Amino acid sequence: MHTMDAPWTILHAGALGDLVLALYLALRLTDAQRPSLTLLSRTNPGDLSACTPSIRRISSETAGVHWLFGGDGPPPARLVEVVAERTVLSFLGHPGLAAHARLGSLRPLALWTVDPRPEPGSARHIVAQWTAQLEAQGLLVPKCIHHRPEKLGLAVPEAWRAGPTGDGASRPVVLLHPGSGGRVKCWPLAAFRAVARRLRAGELGLETEPVFVLGPVELEIWPAAEIAMLRGEFPVLAPEPDELPRHIAAAAAYVGNDAGPTHLAALLGTPTVALFGPTSAAVWRPRGPRVAVLTGECDAGAWGLTGDVVLAVLRELVEG
């Protein structure tokens, strides 16, 4: 069996944004109509089992991935089950690590390993960097993949697009995620709120309801008064991880920082505006069929990005 045709298992230990880009790489390397991919990950990207291809996620802890990094005894049965006779794409580190040798002992049909860290000083997109690593290991990546449009994504069920989100209203919802892993990567909350008011006023060309999405990081570290102020003006969602993809897919559009949910929105095909300040958009920009990236100057107030620019780009995406 050719390795491109075998079932694929992906191992990943990073944050949501990196994980989504790893899934994008897998889509480039495999048939987008493949019935399923198995994902072993620390981070939960949400329930993607109804998408095409179907993503079956097993937590790293449940699968016993810790065995790869040492310990006595036989390998966990669940880990053997999802590695043996499969093509395995590991993001656990470079091929010289002991974990790579342990993975190989589980009899995968093929084993490819990616060091997920960006190359120092490189301006190439991280997916291109990872692809080059795989080619250096001997993976024969078809040249058509290098020229394949960057607009691959997960196909979501039509019921997801038509489903309710936000406050359950029938009017289109625009999701805004003002958070990220650190406040330094966040466009000012005041700027998000100003855009939301203009969306509510109909400046997107249709009546929309702006709904804010807050994740565990924001709920844990943002001041309670700041969150209360936001809730006092707009609907606020704090969905469980498994619920997040459905909310995103049902939205008319999405605006967010360089953060995991923004990458997920792009991959799911929701019109997405991604706002970048201190991080490199050239290396880390989201991939998907309907995504636009706005890059600001981190030394400028609000990164030099105005609500006018954000709304203009969002309008172009929605109308396109």
Image (tube, helix red, strand yellow):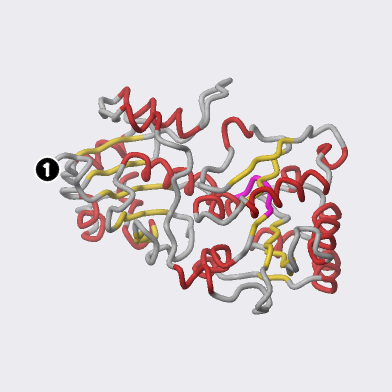
- 282 drawn magenta: no
Report the residue at 36% width, 47% height from top.
11
Is residue 259 shown above or below 244? Answer: above
Question: Which residue lies at the image location 47% right of the left edge and 48% below the top edge?
Answer: 19
Image coords of residue 106 (percent x, y): 19, 46
Relative to 67, residue 130 above or below: above
Q: Nearer the viewer, residue 147 or 230?
A: 147
- Magenta highlight: main SS: strand
Asked if 224 appears above or below 297 in the picture, the reply is below
Please report the residue visible at 27 percent of the width from the left and 44 percent of the height from the top: 88
Pick whichever, 78 or 261, lies toward us: 261
144 is higher (above) or lower (below) than 26: above
**Residue 226: image location, x then y, percent:** 84, 64
Where, by quadrant of the figure, is residue 234 drawn?
bottom right
The residue shown at (17%, 42%) is: 109
The residue identified by callout 1 is 1
Quarter of the image where the N terminus is located: top left
Q: What range of the chain is rendered magenta?
A: 255-259
256 within the magenta span: yes
**Dot 1 alpha-carbon crowd within 10 angstroms: few under 14, some 14 to 19, many 20 or more:** few
Q: Dot 1 lies on which element? A: loop
